[in-house]
Amino acid sequence: MIPFDCDYQDRVVQDVAILAERAFAEDMPDGDVTARVLQLDQREAEAEIICREPVSMCGGLWLEAVLEAHNATHSHQPVRVKTLHQDGARVAAGSTLFQIEGNAAALLTLERTLLNFLGRGIGIANATYAYVSQVRKHNNFTHVLDTRKTLPGYRHFDKYAVLCGGGHNHRMNLSDQILIKENHIAKLEGITSAMAFIKKHLDRQVGIQIEVRSMEELKEAIAAGFPIIMLDNFTPDQVWEACDLERGTCQLEVSGGISLTNIGTYCHPNLDRISIGAITHSIVAPDLSLLMREARI
């Protein structure tokens, strides 16, 4: 079960509806000239979307929004779809993800845009799954989180895909959480004074996190009572030393320089979080195919 609330779900679907409308407008400003010349709108067809490699499913939540955007400009050629796997499920290579029915011309105009959305969503879910799987070889505690390094306009889409891969979301946007970084610390004359300033001026309940660059800064941040502390570009040895400190309820997060090959070296049993920008900004699309055949009458 993907851990999101109804508001989150609604926002993902709303964003995809807007993105899909724009996508079809740019792909078909005056329809599909090939389908029109070949008179494909006179033939009914069926199609399957197949994954040719193992994937983490992503798309069941928002696929109807893509179809509705497509059907809005092809009202005389509606497309129908059946989703065969739940979002978040791990699906074997060769599996059919979706079954689609409709006019042959409509299926062809839908194909590339739909596969573009699925390629990004499943690509992010797959990348997240790979990192989570590496962490689980070492412990069942540490969460893998995304960052704000998402494609502009795709923030909710990308972060939902992270959930589908077994990851967790960091702050959604700059309004969600206070994150004190190096320049903030300098302006506020140190970590302890930064926390005092926040407590004095915070006007609503939000998360509070600070980024530290050394063991000395970490110890000061723990003493100041920061709920979450990000260990910025700490080495694996420094992370293990940090995790062995007494810190009460303070959570520790590692960020910077994390890859699939080295993530295991950071996985202290008491490390709370690892945030990884690559799971949303360096996407490899999975091998997906839409296979179409004429409908049986």
Image: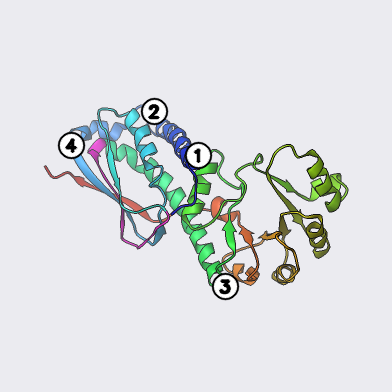
Q: Which segment is the magenta one?
A: 88-105
Q: Earlier in the sequence, mark 2 or mark 3?
A: 2
Q: Earlier in the sequence, mark 4 or mark 1?
A: 1
- The quadrant of the image that shows the N terminus is bottom left
> Which residue position holds label 3?
138
Q: Residues within 10 Å of mark 1 (few under 14, many from 20)?
A: few
Q: Identify the residue shown where x is 69% and y is 61%.
A: 252
Above or below residue 262? Residue 79 is: above
Above or below residue 74? Residue 158 is: below
**The residue under label 4 is which amino acid type?**
Arg
- Distance from the alpha carbon under mark 3 to that under mark 4: 54 Å
> Which residue position holds label 4?
43
85 is within the stretch colored magenta: no
Q: Nearer the viewer, mark 2 or mark 3?
A: 3
**The residue under label 1 is which amino acid type?**
Asp
Q: Identify the residue shown where x is 49% and y is 51%.
A: 3
Q: Nearer the viewer, mark 2 or mark 4?
A: 4
Q: Earlier in the sequence, mark 3 or mark 1?
A: 1
> Which residue position holds label 1?
7
Q: Earlier in the sequence, mark 1 or mark 2?
A: 1
Residue 48, position as x, y percentages in the image = 27, 50
